[in-house]
């Protein structure tokens, strides 16, 4: 029997950042190195971390692989693709320093992930979430925040607003009545720009070219806009802020709606359940909602290092379930492959697909390679 749904009005806020934000740059570099290794040797074991600061990219981590990757070239090409190609940006692909400190994976960890019935690469808890409130089966605030940042990047790279620079952020507050998202209450944009653009022009251009095409009918006369409210955002990227792999985990997942296990995704091969387990948890939650078993669903999986089976499964449907949560947990164990090796095989994760996940979220994207977004299990449920 369903429990009573939330019936009060409330506001939910989520943020996103562009691929030129220093933390997202670090994620993309780590995932680009991972892709290069997996492309040559699909069995590569990788935990790659990147730190970016003024004039320097530093890559460290543990790698066991038969592949050879020129880390220097990958770092510079990734930075170049993001758009840091001018010296006046304060950080530039061809002139920044690149340092590496990479060693092999610990043999003690390897014992747990290289046996025939592959165990988890570490202990931990992973969460997946899905809701029927949007086509993407994601909370509306994070969907809109990601779309705004993608639009910021598009108008920059296509020269529509040619004074923009790579760094940028968005934030969206959505008003809910009961469980329904009804309007956007507030939009925040921070866009890095050339020094000679006037603030008033930037605000008008951003509202016209970025916010309106994305937010459309969700805004009204009471929606507020906060666009570059400090008045100046010329210095950005690693010149302004140190970037680090895995520091935007809420941006990567569900924007603060639902739980997060604490482990980041980028730079990790799929033997690390921080990545593969979280992708499977999203896959399970999304298929449960797609099957009509619940309108919202959060799935927690937990693992112990070296142990194939999850140590626990928890399903929370927020009172929107058609069947008991215990029944849904039982069917999850029965129908979904939850051992790391089975997850990797079912979702086809040993491919160079990870660079694209590094910005604009790992979930809610109908794109090639995002196999955890399929709803092919819904009929079986």
Image: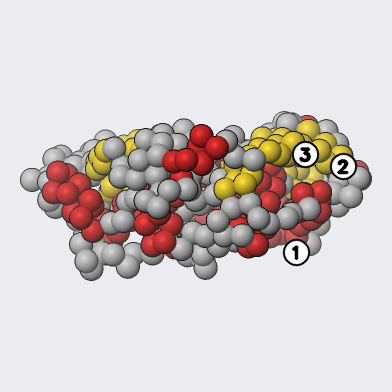
Q: Which residue is mark 1?
A: 158
Q: Is residue 255 visible?
A: no
Q: Residue at x 14, y 52 (%)?
A: 322
Quadrant occupied by the N terminus: top left
CA neighbours of label 3 inside 10 A, class few (<14), some (14 to 19), many (20+): few
User: For residue 100, which numbered disc appears in the image?
Assistant: 3
Residue at disc 1, secondary structure: loop
Q: Earlier in the sequence, mark 2 or mark 1?
A: 2
Between label 2 and label 1, give the one nearer the viewer: 2
Residue at disc 3, secondary structure: strand
- Percent of width and height locating residue 45: 57, 48
- Examine the image and state in which quarter residue 55 appears: top right
- Percent of width and height locating residue 74: 76, 53
Between label 1 and label 3, give the one nearer the viewer: 3
Q: Which residue is mark 2?
A: 96
Alpha carbon separation for disc pair 3 and 2:
13 Å
- Examine the image and state in which quarter residue 161 appears: bottom right
Q: Is residue 97 visible?
A: yes
Report the number of discs.
Answer: 3
Alpha carbon separation for disc pair 2 and 1:
25 Å
Q: Residue at x 61, y 60 (%)?
A: 41
Q: Earlier in the sequence, mark 1 or mark 3?
A: 3
CA neighbours of label 2 inside 10 A, class few (<14), some (14 to 19), many (20+): some
- Examine the image and state in which quarter residue 52 appears: top right
- Percent of width and height locating residue 56: 82, 36
Depth check: 172 or 72 in front?
Answer: 72
């Amino acid at each position: 029997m369903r429990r009573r749904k939330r019936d009060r009005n409330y506001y939910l806020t989520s943020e996103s950042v562009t691929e030129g934000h220093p933390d997202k740059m670090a994620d993309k570099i780590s995932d680009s190195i991972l892709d290069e290794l997996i492309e040559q040797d699909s069995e590569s074991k990788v935990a790659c971390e990147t730190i970016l600061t003024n004039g320097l990219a530093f890559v460290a981590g543990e790698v066991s692989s038969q592949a050879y990757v020129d880390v220097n070239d990958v770092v510079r090409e990734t930075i170049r693709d993001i758009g840091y190609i001018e010296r006046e940006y304060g950080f530039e692909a061809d002139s920044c320093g690149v340092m590496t400190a990479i060693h092999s994976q610990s043999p003690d960890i390897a014992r747990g992930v290289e046996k025939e019935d592959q165990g988890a690469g570490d202990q931990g808890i992973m969460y997946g979430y899905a809701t029927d409130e949007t086509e993407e089966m994601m909370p509306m605030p994070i969907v809109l925040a990601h779309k705004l940042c993608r639009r910021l990047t598009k108008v920059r790279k296509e020269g529509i607003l040619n004074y923009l620079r790579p760094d940028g952020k968005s934030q969206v507050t959505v008003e809910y009545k009961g469980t329904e998202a009804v309007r956007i209450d507030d939009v925040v944009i921070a866009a890095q720009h050339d020094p000679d653009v006037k603030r008033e022009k930037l605000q008008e251009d951003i509202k016209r070219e970025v916010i309106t095409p994305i937010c459309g009918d969700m805004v009204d006369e009471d929606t507020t806009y906060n666009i570059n409210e400090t008045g100046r955002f010329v210095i950005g990227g690693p010149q302004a802020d140190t970037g680090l792999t895995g520091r935007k985990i809420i941006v990567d997942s569900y924007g603060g709606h639902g739980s997060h296990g604490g482990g980041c995704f980028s730079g990790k091969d799929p033997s690390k359940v921080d990545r593969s387990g979280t992708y499977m948890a999203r896959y399970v939650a999304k298929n449960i909602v797609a099957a009509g078993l619940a309108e919202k669903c959060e799935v927690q999986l937990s693992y112990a290092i070296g142990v194939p089976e999850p140590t626990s499964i928890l399903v929370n449907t927020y009172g929107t379930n058609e069947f008991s949560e215990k029944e849904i947990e039982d069917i999850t164990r029965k129908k979904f492959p939850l051992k790391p090796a089975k997850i990797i095989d079912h979702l086809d994760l040993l491919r160079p697909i990870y660079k694209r996940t590094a910005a604009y979220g790992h979930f809610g994207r109908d794109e090639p390679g995002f196999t955890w977004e399929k709803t092919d299990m819904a009929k079986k449920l």
